[in-house]
Amino acid sequence: MIPLHSHSSGRHFLQIPGPTNVPDRVLRAIDNVTIDHRGPEFGVLGKAVLAGMKKVFKTKADVVIYPASGTGAWEAALVNTLSPDDLVLMVETGHFATLWKRMASKLGLKVEFLAGDWRHGIDSAQIGARLKADKDHQIKAVCAVHNETATGVTSNIAALRKAIDSSGHPALLMVDTISSLGSMDYRHDEWGVDVTVAGSQKGLMLPPGLAFNAISAKALAASETAALQRSYWDWKEMLAINPSGYFPYTPATNLLYGLHEALEMLFAEGLDKVFVRHYRFGEATRRAVRAWGLEILCLNPDEYSSALTAVVVPDGHSADAFRKTVLHHFNMSLGQGLSKLSDKVFRIGHLGDLNELTLCGTLAGVEMGLEISGIPHKKGGVQAAMDYLSESSMAALTRAA
Ligand SMILES: *Cc1c(COP(=O)(O)O)cnc(C)c1O
């Protein structure tokens, strides 16, 4: 272990919106001998994790797994489906949408980037109108970030699909679910998504290092003629060997053990319950923020994220100094404001492996940090969250009875 910190007793609270806390069960699973990835045991593991990921994506179509960070899955989605100078429609929902756009430009695509204020999700009507105006179908793909991790704003992908359908436009739909998959409802098949992009270290409760694409038949057909250069990311090589549970190059064997365990945990809890749990934690956090008298960055209540909440720090105060104080006094990491939100917001991650008491501890750390930092606020945020958590859990019990 690199001695970055002196020892602090108790558990570190990793409440950034990814990487998230890795459950002990997953750590134990990863801590196993690395086996021959071409040997007889491996195929069983490979098949099981591929089948499990289809359930999480809610798809019957193909899923591929790369040893990579989420950024690799972004690249795989683009290079497998598009050709140089193809026009792609993207929306500036925040930092991550902006990074994906930059990548598309670097890869030789033309990008039309619809400006956004980093406080709202995607306006489906605007996309529909733009596609309708594109009579000769210059636009080859629409790329959307489902949960913008920089802002805590979620876009409605079902509504986006409807808008694309009613425009009668054939563009592919590609969606980044890196910080939503496994925390918020997501339906690759039902929402007609062509490529879904995901990563391991957020809702899937794993360390960083695995990246995923779910691939529709239409996207697969597009890959036959797509002319962007690709080798490592080529779906074809993966899909040729995956049905036997094997991979064309060395997979991240130990992370796949972890994935197998994480999938068992998600299915044992039940995906619907996992989504309700995240919703409740999001709502409890928002009630705390309102009770403190602080501002939630997301302006549209229909677009609140269940995975994280970005909180605006009052003018004249430093969000980064506040985060430093919380880390120093309470051994808790909160998410920083990214690019243009730098030092203006902090982000509370409430996704992955956590329960009511983890959340209450997190919010208590924030409330005490506000006090120590001299950031103007009212007391009672943690109380508001506790009130909601106890009421909503009783309601759930009553409904079940
Ligand atoms: C974390 C994240 C990424 C980047 O993933 P890496 O694993 O850091 O490459 C991209 N998009 C979203 C929405 C994210 O939350």
Image (tube, rainbow, N blue to C red):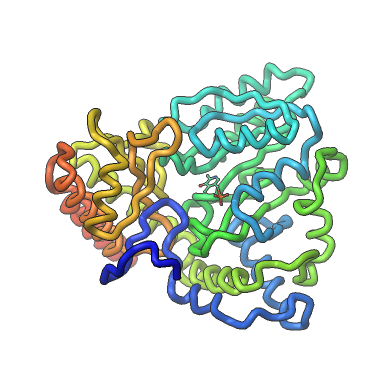
Q: Is residue 90 above or below residue 186?
A: above
Locate the C terminus by quadrant.
bottom left
Looking at the picture, tell me which residue is in the foreground, 6 or 246: 6
Looking at the picture, tell me which residue is in the foreground, 241 or 190: 241
The residue drawn where x is 26% and y is 71% is: 9
The residue drawn where x is 27% and y is 42% is: 321
In this figure, what is the number of numbered marks?
0
Where's residue 360, x and y in %?
Answer: 24, 59
Residue 340 shows in this picture: yes
Where's residue 383, x and y in %?
Answer: 16, 53
* Left or right position of 236 against 202: right
Locate the N terminus by quadrant.
bottom left
- Residue 157: quadrant of the picture: top right
Looking at the picture, tell me which residue is in the foreground, 78 or 14: 14
* Left or right position of 13 against 274: left
Q: Is residue 261 above or below residue 302?
A: below
Where's residue 205, x and y in %?
Answer: 48, 63
The residue drawn where x is 50% and y is 67% is: 266
User: What is the residue that sits farthest to the left in this orientation?
Assistant: 379
